[in-house]
Image (spheres, helix red, strand yellow):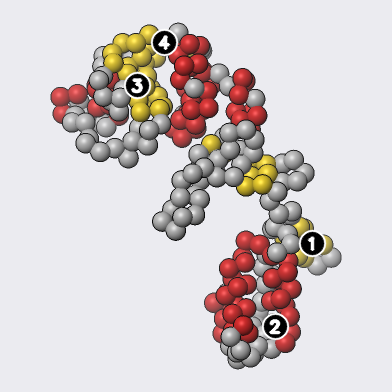
């Protein structure tokens, strides 16, 4: 693509582009960039400009596409994309999220399910009753565990597992230490805590943990006497 720019201002066709130089929806910014010379009156060779115009029309009509000799694979555009309320500095949404269906959906019914930016199994969203506390807390990926616990809800988790409170700290960001028995695992202890974003999740801690503060210290790689709770959490 670096070589492509060399020919746009003098009307020459770039060399060695072959049949791979065809952009689509995901490369719309490149099409806009290279169409700009003609828009401000700079000369471009007619067949080059025509090719750019064709790609512009394709980008406006389909999603990913892959042209090859004798065959062309074309994907449909998204039928639905949904985000949560998090925005970046420019005010643009940054996290895919939907609570009652696929956050990214196509017209043939296929889609991807996301919970506040984390991709999750479709059944967790489509059939919430099938998600169990054991499955949620058994996730080794912390983001998946957090998402599963948020979807399931802590009242249901504690009810299903008959959790017993061992210690409750006055600071909700230090949390509550609970004892549960996990199916196929056995006794386990979790610190139920609220993070800096206001969301609640659980972290498995050693079974010898006696207080929520000790569990927080363990997560930080410190002993309880060396751990000082941070003033600001993120």
Q: CA distance from mark 3 to mark 2?
A: 62 Å
For mark 2, give the secondary structure: helix
Residue 76's x, y, as percent?
74, 53
Name the residue beneath numbered marker 1: 72
Nearest the camera: 40 or 183? Answer: 40
Q: Residues within 10 Å of mark 4 (few under 14, many from 20)?
A: some
Name the residue beneath numbered marker 3: 191
- Residue at screen point 31% across, 11% down: 166
* Position of the N terminus by quadrant: bottom right
Q: Is residue 229 left or right of residue 161?
A: left
Q: CA distance from mark 3 to mark 1?
A: 53 Å
For mark 3, give the secondary structure: strand
Q: CA distance from mark 1 to mark 4?
A: 56 Å
For mark 4, give the secondary structure: loop
Residue 219's x, y, as percent?
30, 29
Q: Residues within 10 Å of mark 1 (few under 14, many from 20)?
A: few
Name the residue beneath numbered marker 2: 48
- Residue at screen point 58% across, 22% down: 131
* Mark identifier at residue 163: 4
Q: Earlier in the sequence, mark 3 or mark 1?
A: 1
Q: Earlier in the sequence, mark 3 or mark 2?
A: 2
């Amino acid at each position: 693509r670096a070589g492509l720019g060399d020919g746009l201002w003098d009307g020459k066709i770039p060399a060695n582009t072959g049949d791979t130089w065809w952009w689509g929806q995901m490369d719309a910014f490149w099409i806009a960039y290279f169409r700009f010379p003609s828009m401000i009156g700079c000369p471009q060779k007619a067949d080059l400009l025509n090719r750019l115009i064709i790609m512009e029309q394709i980008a406006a009509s389909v999603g990913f596409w892959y042209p090859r000799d004798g065959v062309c694979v074309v994907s449909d555009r998204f039928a639905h994309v949904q985000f949560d309320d998090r925005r970046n500095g420019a005010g643009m949404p940054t996290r895919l999220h939907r609570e009652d269906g696929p956050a990214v959906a196509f017209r043939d019914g296929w889609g991807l399910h996301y919970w506040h930016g984390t991709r999750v199994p479709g059944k967790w969203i489509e059939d919430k009753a099938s998600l169990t506390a054991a499955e949620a807390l058994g996730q080794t990926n912390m983001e998946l565990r957090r998402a599963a616990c948020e979807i399931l809800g802590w009242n249901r988790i504690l009810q299903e597992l008959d959790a017993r409170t061992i210690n409750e700290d006055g600071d909700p960001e230090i949390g509550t230490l609970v004892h549960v028995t996990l199916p196929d695992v056995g006794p386990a202890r979790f610190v139920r805590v609220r993070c800096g974003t206001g969301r609640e999740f659980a972290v498995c801690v050693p079974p010898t943990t006696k207080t929520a503060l000790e569990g927080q210290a363990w997560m930080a790689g410190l002993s309880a006497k060396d751990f000082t709770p941070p003033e600001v959490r993120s």
